[in-house]
């Protein structure tokens, strides 16, 4: 080959190499820009993820507080149910005692009517009647 042919051959190879270098540089620049865009998007997502994680922690704390309050409310409700049951039983007991006292008073009132006020026992019966009346009033007050 002549020097001129070798030179033309080298010039063609140079042009191919420069073309490949230009294509590689363009591709490298495009990849750099794409990488930067992806890095920024990743950074934005990381920030959003951090915000969501903090929100999740806040919600978890709130849920824990709500669960604790619910448990306290259930405990208080159970305590009040038990207290209500106890008061209801006590009220029934007092009503029964009041009924018994009323019957005793009626009986004493009948006895008092049959006994003459001058007899010695009438004063004692009046005192018992008064005492039973006072007890009945006290029981009614307690029942309320």
Image (cartoon, rainbow, N blue to C red):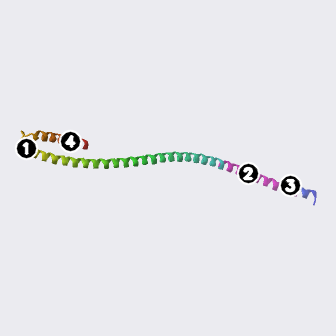
N-terminal of the pair, mark 4 or mark 2, is 2
Q: Residue at x 76, y 51 (%)?
A: 25
Disc 3, SS:
helix
The span from disc 1 to disc 2 (Cα, nearest Å) is: 127 Å
Between tags 3 and 4, which lies in front? 4
> Would you name the residue on which mark 2 appears?
28
Q: Which mark is residue 135?
A: 4
Disc 4, SS:
helix
The span from disc 4 to disc 1 (Cα, nearest Å) is: 24 Å
Q: Residue at x 23, y 43 (%)?
A: 139
> Would you name the residue on which mark 3 appears?
11
Between tags 1 and 2, which lies in front? 1
Q: Which mark is residue 115?
A: 1
Looking at the image, can residue 144 be seen? no
Marks 1 & 2, CB-CB < 8 Å contact:
no
Disc 2, SS:
helix
- Asked whether 125 falls inside the magenta stretch, the response is no
- Asked whether 14 falls inside the magenta stretch, the response is yes
């Amino acid at each position: 080959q002549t020097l001129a042919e070798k030179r033309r051959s080298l010039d063609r190879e140079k042009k191919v190499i420069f073309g490949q270098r230009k294509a590689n540089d363009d591709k490298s620049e495009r990849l750099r820009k794409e990488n930067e865009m992806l890095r920024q998007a990743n950074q934005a997502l990381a920030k959003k993820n951090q915000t969501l994680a903090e929100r999740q922690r806040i919600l978890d704390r709130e849920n824990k507080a709500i669960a604790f309050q619910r448990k306290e409310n259930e405990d208080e409700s159970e305590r009040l149910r038990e207290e209500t049951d106890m008061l209801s039983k006590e009220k029934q007991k007092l009503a029964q005692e009041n009924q018994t006292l009323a019957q005793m008073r009626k009986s004493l009132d009948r006895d008092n009517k049959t006994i003459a006020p001058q007899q010695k026992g009438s004063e004692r019966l009046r005192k018992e009647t008064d005492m039973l009346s006072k007890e009945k009033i006290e029981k009614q007050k307690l029942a309320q």
